[in-house]
Image (tube, grey):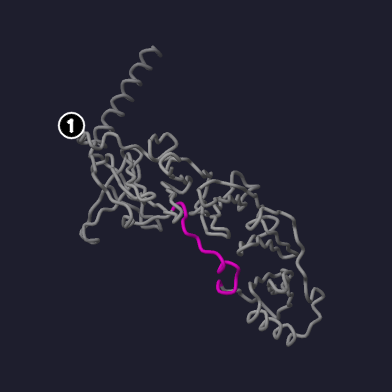
Amino acid sequence: MWIWGSVVLLIAVGFYVFLSSKKLIIDHNSQPLDVKYSDLQEINGDYNSDIFEVRLIAEVEVTSSASPNPIRIFPSVNGQLILECDAKVDDETSFDYRYYKIDRTGVVTDSIYSSYSDYQVQFIDDFMVYTSDKDGHYTTWPLNGDTTKRRLVELNTDLIWADEKVEAMTREINKSAKYWFSSSFGNDSVWYRKTYFYADGKWKLLWQKLLGYTNVSDEESGNRYRKDVFRSGEVGFEMPKDVRLLYFYPEDKMKYHHIIGGGAGGFSVYNWRGQGFFETNVAGKNFRFKVPRLVVEKEKYNGFRPSLYTVSEAGGSAEIYNPAFYHSPNGFSFYSPNSQQMFIIKMKRRQLD
């Protein structure tokens, strides 16, 4: 009897899956894809071209929304770029970072690991300045790869300077030092301000005991010395100006969901999912690629401009797709299809000769 019961159960499950699938997918496009798009490929490690080289340059594991941009790129000295990765793979490495130097030809020349539990890091031209509540140091790794820890010249460590003297020196630092930034922290309800500055060929640190809580603004922090030019996980409903949607090939009309969040719930729609074919410019040449599982929505509220999403499966939730690129003036480009991955696209060497 148990055999017949199992058979009946399997049949019931089959009917359920079949009927559910029919409800989720209501139409299929029988028209073939135009042959002029058949050779376009996805941007991944298998991309094959006589002109372009495509390589995965960074991949991270992100398990929470705390890091919406876990891969970031910013300019550095010697015409190089620094690629910063969120190194979180477990609780112990939460907020740690890996940094990679990328030279003018798009080659990774060096890397370094930084543990956030030990120090916070500021990239300021030739220097990496490591700060903490207790102490700090700096290196010249951005300039020459040297990781030697150089001690800071610390001032007022015994906190006996008069407030007037500290304030006067702070004003002079802000006026004359080549670089300076501040931070504050509390310990046993006592607050301290630390001003880091570069003068006389050395990094120095001025301590100050405060009367109460003091917030350091972004304009005073070390963040002002750094400007990201590209980040993974960026979202946007409007297509970047340097990317063109050449053609959308519908495959299946299906039901999927938009999750709004913030307690507002969501809604479901029926729309065509298929393949999108795009074009951008890399090193002066047209670079074309395709994106599978794409849906295109056009609404009156935004002037019927296309909004792009990907849907992994029928009945699933739509994820905003942003075909984001950063085109380096040195002739190579970065592409990030999602928050976890970043690719570099370069001309093959024989194309440059």
* Between 229 and 80, the one nearer to me in the picture: 80
Residue 115 spot, x, y in % from top left: 67, 52
- Pick the quarter of the image with the N terminus: top left
Q: Is residue 320 visible?
A: no
In the shown orientation, is residue 196 left or right of residue 107? Answer: right
Q: What residue range appears in magenta?
A: 218-233
In the shown orientation, is residue 127 left or right of residue 287? Answer: right
Residue 232 magenta-highlighted: yes
Residue 268 spot, x, y in % from top left: 28, 47
Residue 266 magenta-highlighted: no
Which residue shows up at 60% across the image and 64% down it? 125
In the shown orientation, is residue 187 left or right of residue 261? Answer: right
Residue 284 spot, x, y in % from top left: 35, 51
* Between 38 and 163, the one nearer to me in the picture: 38
Which residue shows up at 60% across the image and 53% down it? 95
Which residue shows up at 56% across the image and 54% down it? 82
Q: Please, which residue is most extreme toward the left here?
A: 31
Q: Quadrant of residue 220?
A: bottom right
Q: Is residue 155 visible?
A: yes
Q: Please, which residue is most extreme toward the bottom here?
A: 164
- Pick the quarter of the image with the C terminus: top left
Q: Quadrant of residue 124?
A: bottom right
Predominant SS along the magenta part: loop
Pointer 1 residue: 30
Note whether 277 is above or below 220 in the view shown.
above
Note whether 162 is above or below 111 in the view shown.
below
Which residue shows up at 30% across the image and 46% down it? 278
